[in-house]
Amino acid sequence: MKKNVLKKMVAILVMGLGVVSMTACGGASKAQTDKEEGSSESVKTEEKTTVKIADFKIYPASCQIIIADKKGFFKQEFDKVGADYSITKFLNGPAINEAFASKDVDFSAIGALPGYTGINNTKNQIFIGNDLTNFGEAVITYDGSGIESVGDLKGKKVGFAVGTADQTILEEILLDYSLSINDITPVNVAEEAKRENSIISKNVDAILIYEPYLTSILSTESDLKVIETNEKHGSVVPLVARADFVEEHPDIAEAFVRAIQDANDWLLANKDETIKIVSEETGVDETSIKATIEKNKYATAFTDEDITELHSVVDYLKKEGNIDNDFDADKYINKTFYEKINSK
């Protein structure tokens, strides 16, 4: 009898343990299911794309990126398409090209010459609009140099940033006097401060300089003089984008151009405040910033004259053997975004 009772108790205990085990397993499965569902839900919540923007360390002429940042136009436009942004400062166009090549930059403003050079090297950069035109370039020399006009520069040492927009601007000025880069002794001085020092110390005979540095140096160095300006020729600084990024995120590309256009409109309507903001950001005096803004044309749309200037840059690069002869200047100009924005 006792044995039968014991067997029944063991059976009941085993069944109970089985139920507990099944319940525990069932509870674990439910918890695991909940976890997996929660995990699935978090995967579906997409992270914001961070837009990587390049700007110049000290180049107040191209001030829309500064204004779009400080006045909230980037945030406003990128919020609409679910994106964040970051801005990295670079010395010049060639440095920005390196960042484009390594995909560390998605958008920038860059001179036409380094812009097309970068396109030729990577085939992954395009122009999606204009940043500015005519940034007040001039050739200056010092009293006693014996140089009275550009025609006197033959055989002289001229300082400029080789491989940047400076080079094509200087070439165009020289051509007006039947000279070329090959007729002078180029001195590569990429940084503006060093370029200014090179003419002040008379280590070069002349330099190409642009606003706001032109107004600044002439106001402090009385023995310097302008021998030629670039008023006869346009100088274009396009908005450049990484082509594969634009293809993947056309909404973000449009947002970028919209923010730049917003900055254009705002700075033209608020020049005094723009001057203060840009001066604080770059450390350049307000008088020089004012001269810069007054000389520049700010518009995201390329004019026919701008397109002609872009073609002339490509022709120059072909002549110098820096790009292939069959390179098509228009192939890498995307008008979609600024035409859409300016049509409204």
Image (cartoon, rainbow, N blue to C red):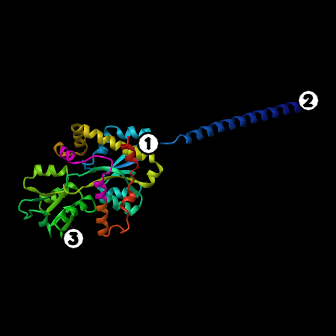
User: For mark 2, what is the residue?
Assistant: 2
User: Are the two marked residues, 2 and 1, in contact with CB atoms closer than 8 angstroms?
Assistant: no
Q: Nearer the viewer, mark 3 or mark 1?
A: 3
State the residue position of label 3: 182
Q: Secondary structure beneath disc 2? A: helix
The amino acid at mark 2 is Lys
Classed neighbour count for the residue bearing mark 3: other residues with Cα under 10 Å, few (<14), some (14–19), many (≥20): few
| Among numbered discs 3 and 1, the one appearing first in the sequence | 1
293 in magenta? yes
Q: Of the residues shown, which amino acid type is indicated by label 3?
A: Asn
Give the left or right position of residue 225, taking residue 337 as reference.
Answer: left
Q: Circle 1 is placed at which residue position?
A: 83
Q: Secondary structure at mark 1?
A: strand
- SS type, badge 3: helix
Residue at left offset 33%, top offset 58%: 115
Overall secondary structure of the magenta stretch? helix
Q: Earlier in the sequence, mark 2 or mark 1?
A: 2
Q: What residue appears at the point 25 percent right and 37 percent down from the top-left corner?
A: 269
Residue range highlighted in magenta: 289-310
Q: Residue at x 64, y 36 (%)?
A: 34
Q: Residues within 10 Å of mark 2 (few under 14, many from 20)?
A: few
Residue 215 coordinates in the image, percent (x, y): 15, 49
